[in-house]
Amino acid sequence: MSFVKASVSTLAIFAMGATAAVARDQVHIAGSSTVLPYASIVAEAFGENFDFPTPIVEGGGSGAGRKRMCEGVGLDKIDIANSSSLMKDAQWETCQATVGPVTEVRIGYDGITFSTGLSNKGFENLTPAQIYLALSARSNAETWADVDPSLPAVGIKAFIPGTKHGTREVFDEKVMLVGCESVGAYDALVTELGDEDAAEEACMAVRTDGRSVDIDGDYTETLASLDANPEGVGVFGLSFLLNNTDKLYAAKINGVEPGFATIASGEYPVSRPLQFYVKNAHISQVPGMKEYIEFFVSDEIAGPDGPLAEYGLVSDPELAKTQEIVAGLE
């Protein structure tokens, strides 16, 4: 969807600011480590098939990418922010007050998996309640069997995305908060704290005793952590899992296996849309920017038979609507 809330006079100022900046001929993108491999595939193919330089694609996390995009208008600023989480209303307002219109472009869907090494048996199925009871800041469980006797009697060690990653927001809201509610802890926290927002924050707070470890890098760092801790559990995007099935297997969540069909249907409970955010004021200033965006969401690239699906992206059933939005960018 597109959010356009800037006045004509404000837009004129934004446009002048972009024109005054030092010219460049490459699209500059940063953000989500989940979207990074998809954007890199598209950027490389774009450079090979168009008369424009290959776009520069960096990681850094969804929050960091959106922050950089919203810093201002000018060709010393990035053009596009990749994101595995949705921009909140307050950030929309602040960002567009600074840079003018911003457009959200959905590229498909992904699932968050709870995966472990092939030799670490017993994690074939997990529930948000079990994960919450293991990783909550209020937990003192030492093994997974302490949480649920049906789980392995191995020490709790989970490697989760750091707070700058969009995946963390999904983990907090769709796993920790859901698990907290399902065991009745949320209602107890509301009574204890006297505030629903405070109760939600408490539900999403994780242990700081070394049982839950934030990973600030990308999924390769999480994989390396599992290599060093063979009984650990790591949080990965579906695409990373599918490209590492020689090392990892994923737990079902509430009995549902993560996969293309279950994520596209919404049956898998820990799925999320993937998108990027476009700074509209740069489209007329950066050669090839609109062409790159159109190429990214084309049927040939983002469709069910394209290279992104082959890598692990769950194609958006409403891709045609996104293509219409992109066609109207200017």
Image (cartoon, grey):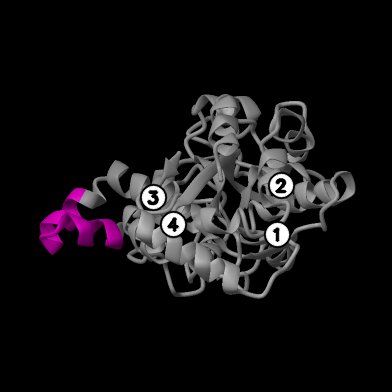
Name the amino acid, label 3. Glu
Please indicate, yes or no, whether residue 118 appears anywhere in the rendered image: no
Q: Earlier in the sequence, mark 2 or mark 1?
A: 1
Q: Give the spatial CA distance, label 2 vs label 4.
A: 44 Å
In this rendering, the answer to whether 282 lies above or below 216 is above
> In percent of the image, x 11 and y 56: which residue is there?
191
The image shows residue 74 at horizontal and vertical percentages of 56, 70
Residue bearing mark 1? 27
Eye-nearest disc, 1 or 3: 1
In this rendering, the answer to whether 24 lies above or below 197 is below
The image shows residue 38 at horizontal and vertical percentages of 72, 48
Return the mark for residue 292: 2
Q: Earlier in the sequence, mark 4 or mark 3?
A: 4
Q: Give the spatial CA distance, label 2 vs label 1.
A: 8 Å
Magenta stretch secondary structure, dominant: helix
Secondary structure state at the residue bearing disc 3 = helix
Secondary structure state at the residue bearing disc 2 = helix
Which range is magenta?
Answer: 187-202
Secondary structure state at the residue bearing disc 4 = helix
Image quadrant in which the N terminus is located? top left
Residue bearing mark 3? 173
Left or right, 61 with respect to 308, comes to: left
143, 317: nearer the viewer: 317
Please indicate, yes or no, whether residue 140 appears anywhere in the rendered image: yes
Return the mark for residue 328: none
